[in-house]
Every structure is written in structure tokens, then in C-alpha cells.
Image: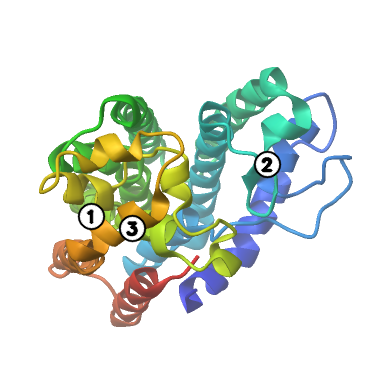
């Protein structure tokens, strides 16, 4: 996707390898969803996913002149929290595939997958504590990680409520700012803390939250109009699952009956997609993605970032807006 994601990938993967236990009953439950092992416990081809959150933490720390040694345990903890959330989300949503493989609950069963998610969260906190920073910064980083994780879980609670009851765009954006934005905000916040820039942490968190909203809306668009060969899902897959997404919330504001049609089984996908096109929803979503990315860059504009890192962030946001998977 971006040079930044490639730049930090190897050290992040190495750190995940060191953090994940190699022995004991928790080892396969932790290593499988991370992509470090197959269902049989043997080493797998490699970690899946973009590693966006830990990469953003590393980039922010570097942009502010911080050392990679200080941020890497925090970046690793972020990815562990993210994967914990995916394991539990897959159980709640009944999803059977994640990153091209069977989800943890399909491999280990629901009960053990819950244990896997719990273990990943505890491992994240243990890993964050190991950051070689002064004690005050470690405490601040742990607090930021805990708050970000709690806000992410609050977002999941709101998401499940919205799937049942529906909601307007403001309700949806409030949910997305928590569910997706909280951890991305925490990524930039932890990078600033690792660089010792406590005063700048809040501004970085706000930038990450805006980035999270852009990321979620783009993800919602791919769930409706993405290329199945790239996303691994059929066109309109979110409609089939009855999920309220930003495009649907946007359209329902003008056509209140649309959400009810989406709740019918089976969903008339072609009819709903045609109505979305009539309401120019796709172009309006693209405009919102662009606006949120500009807001993220605007939050960072007055901050003392190194020029090359600022350019790298701009490249990353452009890639996020254009991503197809």
C-alpha cells in the first residue's frame, strides 16, 4: 500500500514473533490469529494484514525525532489489541474468513477463540509495559492504550446496536470514531509519547481519529462496490449481512424506507445498489473520505514533524483513499 507500511513491517513482525509465546496452551491460540502459525501450530507463511496501526506509531515517533527502540513495544501492543478485537468481532459477526484464512473461532471453536482474544489483550498490556522509556512515559502510554481500547470496545457495542436498530449518519460516525478511530488515534498518540512529546499527544490522537473515520468509510465503500478478487468478498456483501454502513446511513437520510428494504430477507441487492447510485452515494462517500483525510493532515500541519515523515504520511493517506482491498 505504501512505503511506510513496508518500511516498518519487518521490525514489527520480528517484535510480534518475540512477544508471542512459543510453548504452552496459549501459544497456538495467540500465534494463529496473528498469522505466525497455522491451524496445526506449525509456522505459517507470515503475518497478514497491513500493520497500519503499529506502522503509524513508528512513523509518528520517527517524525518527532524519537528512537525506534522506545516505540516498538508500544506499536506491537497496538497490533495485539487490534487482533484481539478482530478475533472477538468475528465471533460476534459470525464471519468465517479473516485475511484469507479461517477465523479463530472456526479453527478452535467459539469458547477457545474467546480465550484467544483475552490472551491477546493481556499480552498487549504486558508488551507495552516493556517499553524502554522513563517510568512516567510508560504510565502515560499504558493509560492511552487502555483508554483507546475501552473506546474501541464502546464502538463495537454501538455498532451492534446500530445493526439492529439502524441510525443516521451522526450516530454512525460517532460509532466509527470509537470503533475504528480510537485505536488509530491511539497509534499516533503512542508515537508522540514514545518521542517524549506529551504536550502534543492529544493533537496526534485527534489526527488519528479523523484518519480512522476516513478508513472506515472507505472500508464501507469496498463492502458495497469493491472488486471481489481484491476484497475476497462478493459485491454488496455488507448488504447480504444486513450491516448498517456509512453509505446506507447516508442514503437512508433521504430515503427512510431504504434501511427497511435492506433488512428484508433475502435482500434485493441490485435494487438497493441502484438506489444508492441514484442518490450519488458513492461520490458523496468519496468526498467525505477526502474531507476526513484533510482534517487529519490539518491536525498535524502545525506540529514539528520532519519533512520526509510528513511527505510519507501524505503518501499513506493518499493510498488509503485509493485502496481497493
Q: Is residue 154 left or right of residue 286?
A: right
Tell me the mark number nearer the camera, choosing from 3 and 2: 3
Q: Earlier in the sequence, mark 1 or mark 2?
A: 2
Q: Secondary structure at mark 1?
A: helix
Which percent across, then down, holds residue 310?
29, 76
Q: Which is nearer the N-term, disc 3 or disc 1?
A: 1
* Horizontal and vertical percent position of residue 93: 51, 32
Q: Secondary structure at mark 2?
A: helix
**Distance CA(mark 1)–CA(mark 2):** 27 Å
Residue picked out by circle 3? 273
**Cα gap from disc 3 to disc 2, whole angstroms:** 33 Å
Which residue corresponds to mark 1?
Answer: 210
Q: Residue 1 at what x, y percent from top left?
A: 49, 74
User: Foreground residue, 185 or 239?
Assistant: 239
Residue at point 79% right, 60% down? 45
Q: From this viewpoint, is residue 199 visible?
A: no
Q: Position of residue 44 (x, y in %)?
A: 81, 53
Marks 3 and 1, how far apart at CA: 27 Å
User: Residue drawn 47% across and 73% down?
Assistant: 4
Please tell me how crowded label 3 is: few (under 14), some (14-19), or many (20+) other residues with Cα within 10 Å. Answer: some
Q: Is residue 126 above or below residue 276?
A: above
Q: Relative to 153, say whether 256 is above or below.
A: below
Query: Residue at the location (62% across, 22% down)?
Result: 114
The answer to whether 184 is drawn above or below residue 321 in the figure is above
Decide which of 231, 65 is in the foreground and name it.
231
What residue is shown with label 2? 33
Amino acid at each position: 500500500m505504501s512505503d511506510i507500511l513496508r518500511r516498518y513491517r519487518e521490525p514489527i513482525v520480528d517484535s510480534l514473533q518475540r512477544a508471542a509465546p512459543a510453548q504452552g496452551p496459549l501459544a497456538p491460540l495467540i500465534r494463529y490469529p496473528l498469522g505466525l502459525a497455522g491451524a496445526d501450530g506449525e509456522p505459517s507463511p507470515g503475518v497478514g494484514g497491513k500493520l497500519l496501526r503499529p506502522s503509524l506509531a513508528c512513523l509518528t515517533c520517527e517524525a518527532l525525532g524519537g528512537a525506534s527502540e522506545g516505540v516498538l513495544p508500544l506499536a506491537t501492543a497496538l497490533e495485539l489489541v487490534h487482533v484481539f478485537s478482530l478475533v472477538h468481532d468475528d465471533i460476534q459477526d459470525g464471519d468465517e474468513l479473516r485475511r484469507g484464512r479461517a477465523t479463530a473461532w472456526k479453527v478452535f471453536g467459539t469458547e477457545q477463540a474467546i480465550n484467544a482474544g483475552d490472551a491477546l489483550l493481556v499480552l498487549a498490556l504486558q508488551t507495552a509495559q516493556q517499553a524502554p522509556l522513563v517510568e512516567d512515559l510508560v504510565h502515560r502510554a499504558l493509560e492511552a492504550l487502555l483508554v483507546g481500547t475501552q473506546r474501541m470496545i464502546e464502538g463495537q457495542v454501538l455498532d451492534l446496536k446500530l445493526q439492529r436498530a439502524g441510525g443516521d449518519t451522526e450516530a454512525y460516525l460517532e460509532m466509527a470514531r470509537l470503533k475504528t478511530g480510537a485505536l488509530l488515534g491511539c497509534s499516533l498518540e503512542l508515537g508522540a509519547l514514545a518521542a517524549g512529546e506529551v504536550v502534543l499527544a492529544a493533537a496526534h490522537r485527534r489526527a488519528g481519529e479523523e484518519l480512522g473515520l476516513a478508513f472506515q468509510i472507505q472500508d464501507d465503500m469496498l463492502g458495497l462496490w469493491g472488486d471481489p478478487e481484491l476484497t475476497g468478498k462478493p459485491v454488496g456483501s455488507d448488504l447480504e449481512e444486513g450491516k448498517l454502513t456509512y453509505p446506507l446511513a447516508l442514503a437512508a437520510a433521504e430515503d427512510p424506507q431504504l434501511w427497511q428494504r435492506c433488512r428484508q430477507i433475502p435482500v434485493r441487492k441490485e435494487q438497493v445498489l441502484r438506489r444508492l447510485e441514484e442518490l450519488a452515494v458513492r461520490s458523496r462517500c468519496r468526498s467525505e473520505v477526502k474531507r476526513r483525510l484533510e482534517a487529519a493532515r490539518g491536525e498535524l500541519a502545525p506540529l514539528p514533524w520532519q519533512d520526509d515523515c510528513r511527505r510519507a504520511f501524505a503518501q499513506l493517506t493518499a493510498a488509503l483513499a485509493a485502496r481497493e482491498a
